[in-house]
Image (cartoon, rainbow, N blue to C red):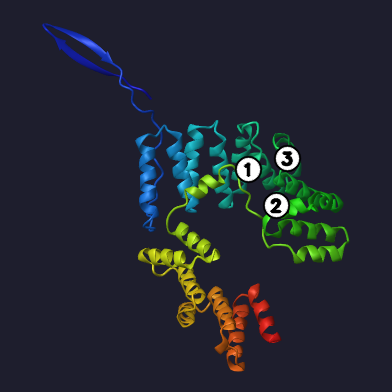
Amino acid sequence: MRTAGIVLTILGTGISLVVVFVLLRSTGPTAIRPALVSDPILRPTIQAYADAVDANPSAPKPRMELGMIYEGANMDELAEQTYKQYVELYPERVIGWYRLAIVQSKQGEIEKAMESLAIGTTVAPPKMSAPHWQLALWYIDTGRLEEAKSQLDIAHVKRPNTVQVQIARGRIALEENDPELAIEILNKEQLISAVPDGYVYQLLGRAYRANGEEEKSRKAWSRAGEKKPTWSDPWTQLVVEHVVGLNAMRQEIMNQMQLNNMPEVRRLVAEYFTYDKDNRVVRRLDASCDAKQGEVAQALMKFVTLIKEDKTDTVTMVLLAKLRMRVNQFQTPTEISITKEILTTVLEISPENKQAPVLLDALIQE
């Protein structure tokens, strides 16, 4: 809404009216703000982004960035509320509908997610296929195969033969009990290598079994992962760039651990502990860093302390067992039996644990 101000200027003996139009900002809803944020890094960041929204409530960028801050911090309800504000203000922008749909799906609201993204597909640019294949994948999940096919046709026209379109068509063939077509679509080395975590092998394992090819099915399942991939969309990296706070620091510690950059792990762990000394994930990483740097006794002590605090902590138990298996002094019959007992406890608490049986087999073979 725009308003005008009237300035009265007295000139000499007469009065003249000089009308001055003062441009005021357009109105919009105030920023969504959380009641409480305990994360000492995230809290001022949210404050700053929310203040930017309220300083210019008609501007799209600050509101979208605030939503991404919430989404990156897994504060999905707040992200959803913020993205709803965005789509109400800018219904013609596909980014709002897409991000709204993603956070709704993360909360298990798949019907709402499909409704939001269905609107997004109507405003998607001519070369943007992501809203269509993502909606198609959700339609497949809910058994709406004909609608899925329609969206895949649009996605294919916009960008032919994307990985997601091929995967979706393979899944439809499986749902329609056409394993031969599924195998034809999916059994391509380029596709298998392009999709992470052995997901294509999951689908091929199902297809071969449905086609009566048990040996090929077993081989496929032996190489298959355990979950569906998380597909990137045009704004995934932008959301990642808005991940801040202790959660982001934990992720960076894990990344540096995988890169075997122990000095940086040490630095980040020390910084993290200035905010939160009790986080069990970081304490495990701290102990693992000790182990990698040859401080075995200290690592063992830290792992044991974690287990004493939580006797159901199977993650730490497995780490402790793996460390014991690498240390020469724990290779006597007595110490090996203790390691076996640790792993047996893991399986008693969590029978589906994948690592414990493998480690136990290795101990038995020794």
- Of 255 and 231, the residue lying toward us: 255
Residue behind mark 2: 194
Q: Are marks 2 and 1 in contact (CB under 8 Å)?
A: no
**Helix, strand or loop status at disc 1:** helix
Mark 3 nearby-residue class (10 Å; few <14, some 14–19, many ≥20) = many
Residue drawn at 77 percent across, 64 percent down: 221
Badge 1: how crowded within 10 Å, few (<14), some, or many (20+)?
many
Q: Earlier in the sequence, mark 2 or mark 3?
A: 3
Q: Which residue is mark 1?
A: 114
- Residue pictured at 11% horizontal, 7% vertical: 12
Name the amino acid, label 3: Leu
Q: CA distance from mark 2 to mark 1?
A: 26 Å
Q: 143 above or below 331?
A: above
How far is disc 2 from disc 3 in space, using C-alphas?
Answer: 19 Å
Where residue 263 sits: x, y (%)? 45, 67
Q: Residue furthest right?
A: 212
Mark 2 or mark 1: whose residue is earlier in sequence: 1
